Amino acid sequence: MAESETPKNNKPVLNHEELRARLPYPAVGLLPHGEPFALIDTIVEEWDQGGKTSSVVHPDHPLAAADGSTGAETFIEYAAQTAAALDAFQRQDKSFGGLLVEVVDSEYSAIPHVGDTVDVVINVQYDLGKWRGIGYEAFLNGKPAAKGTLKLFLTNYEEKK
């Protein structure tokens, strides 16, 4: 387990060096999503309030059109799943599960297609128990493609604490 004693605020103290020694780490099994909607392939980096994932847009992608294109909303889903995968990786448990409740100030400059690589960097802006604010930046084949802020609600947070 990559955590030590629990401080007074009830959050475990993470051993980030131990976690980072496991990277890159496959995201399979960390998300509450089933196939084909579990979009995150690999956790690449991890830090106290965020990290980075890398994924390929697979041919069975649930948002892909017949021509292989997805929509700009795909970046939002990759960002939300990145937050869930990183949280589960840090706790070494399956994701809490949750809902994306708001998308704020998102900007897009590209559209993912089947075969593209989507890298997502997230940073937790606030953590209020069940409520989280996540800033994200998405890169498509290594080039900036989207950024914004997500508000998430962790649906079964109390059960999993």
Image (cartoon, grey):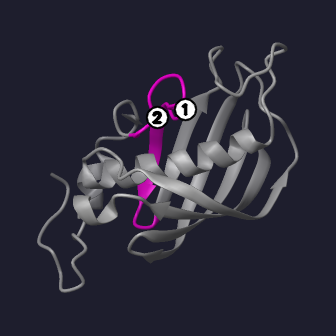
Q: Main secondary structure of the magenta part?
A: loop
- Asked if residue 33 is positioned above or below residue 1 in the image, the reply reads above
Query: What is the three-letter code of the residue carrying label 2?
Result: Thr
Is 160 positioned to the left or the right of 124 in the image? left
Q: Nearer the viewer, residue 44 or 126?
A: 126
Residue bearing the label numbered 2 = 42
Image location of residue 92, percent across then percent down = 25, 48
Query: What is the three-letter code of the residue carrying label 1?
Result: Leu
The image shows a total of numbered marks equal to 2
Q: Which mark is residue 149?
A: none
Residue 49 figure quarter:
bottom left
Q: Tell me the quarter of the image containing the C terminus.
A: bottom left
Secondary element at tag 2: strand
Magenta range is: 31-49
Between circles 1 and 2, the one closer to the viewer is 1
* Residue at the spot 88% in from the left edge and 46% down from the top edge: 109
Q: Is residue 120 visible?
A: no
Secondary element at tag 1: loop
Is 58 positioned to the left or the right of 108 in the image? left
Is 49 positioned to the left or the right of 151 in the image? left
| Residue furthest right in the image | 109
* Residue at the spot 80% in from the left edge and 42% down from the top edge: 72
Residue bearing the label numbered 1 = 39
Image location of residue 141, percent across then percent down = 73, 33
Image location of residue 118, percent across then percent down = 66, 36
Q: Nearer the viewer, residue 135 or 23?
A: 135
* Residue at the spot 34% in from the left edge and 49% down from the top edge: 88
Pointers 1 and 2 in contact (C-beta within 8 Å)? no
Is 56 positioned to the left or the right of 107 in the image? left
Within 10 Å of disc 1 (Cα), the crowding (few <14, some 14-19, many 20+) is many
